[in-house]
Amino acid sequence: MYDYLRIFRHQSPVTVLGPYKRAVIWVQGCDFACQGCIVPESWDKTSGEIISLTELADWIFSQPDIEGITLSGGEPMLQAQTLVNLIDRIHQYRNLGVMCYTGYRLEHLQQHGTDAQKALLKCIDLLVDGTYIEFLHQDLLWRGSSNQRLLMLTERYQQILIEKLAQGDRSTGIEFGIDVTGAFYFTGIPARKGFRDEFAAKMQSRGIIFSN
């Protein structure tokens, strides 16, 4: 039952969604539907791709230079047990760090989360919590709005986080790519509000397909 994950996209290596080089998995399905979300295509729980944990783990193992994985979405906590199973498989062979985004606050998950959600918390080294709030958008490290927090759940990324914040709490930028259909997309958290719509409009005005 928990051997398959519904995902929106997976990509590697990524350097703008967490420390070092990472494999990023955007899960499919989200109930928060934040206004201004840069990946609204990931909201629909019935859309996306269903992928086996074996295939996904093999893909992660094939990435030789990554330090860890980042779970984004969508809302990872909606598929918590499956993600716990994935991380267990990964940790049997490689000591990869885990970063995770969630619209839930940490305190809510600790007090009211399901057993699976609490188990997933125990697998996470660095958590970004809180919904994206468009009018609170700021140029921040690995997050979009000022209500969202960078929470170290283990000491794995303590030093790199201290170093990054000492350089300034600012976005690490975005990365551009072309998917298998030839459509342009970007990865990362834009420094300014409304970037997605501006970028999509510019691409479309030039007859270029945009997909994020």
Image (cartoon, grey):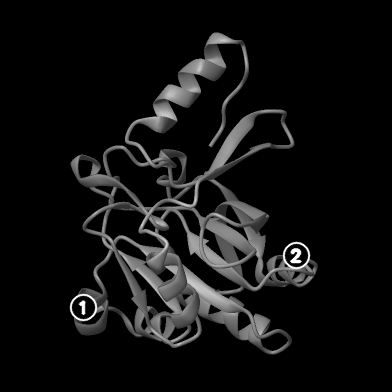
x and y, in percent, of residue 17 in the image:
51, 58
x and y, in percent, of residue 203 in the image:
56, 18
| Foreground pick, 174 / 81 | 174
Q: Which mark is residue 64?
A: none
Left or right position of 166 against 20 = left
Whether residue 78 can be seen here: no
Q: Count numbered badges in the picture.
A: 2
Looking at the rendered structure, the secondary structure element under dot 2 is helix
Question: How far apart are the two marked residues, 1 and 2, measured between alpha carbons?
Answer: 33 Å
Residue beneath the point at 77% across and 70% down: 58
The amino acid sitting under disc 1 is: Glu
Q: Eyeballing the image, is 18 above or below 113?
A: above
Q: Residue tagged by mark 2? A: 59
Q: Eyeballing the image, is 127 above or below 51?
A: below
The amino acid sitting under disc 2 is: Trp
Whether residue 13 can be seen here: yes
**Screen quadrant of the N terminus:** bottom right
Q: Earlier in the sequence, mark 1 or mark 2?
A: 2
x and y, in percent, of residue 28 in the image:
48, 53
Quarter-wise, where is residue 115 in the image?
bottom left
Furthest residue to the front? 167
Looking at the rendered structure, the secondary structure element under dot 1 is helix
Q: Residue tagged by mark 1? A: 107
Residue beneath the point at 35% across and 58% down: 169
Q: Are marks 1 and 2 in contact (CB under 8 Å)?
A: no
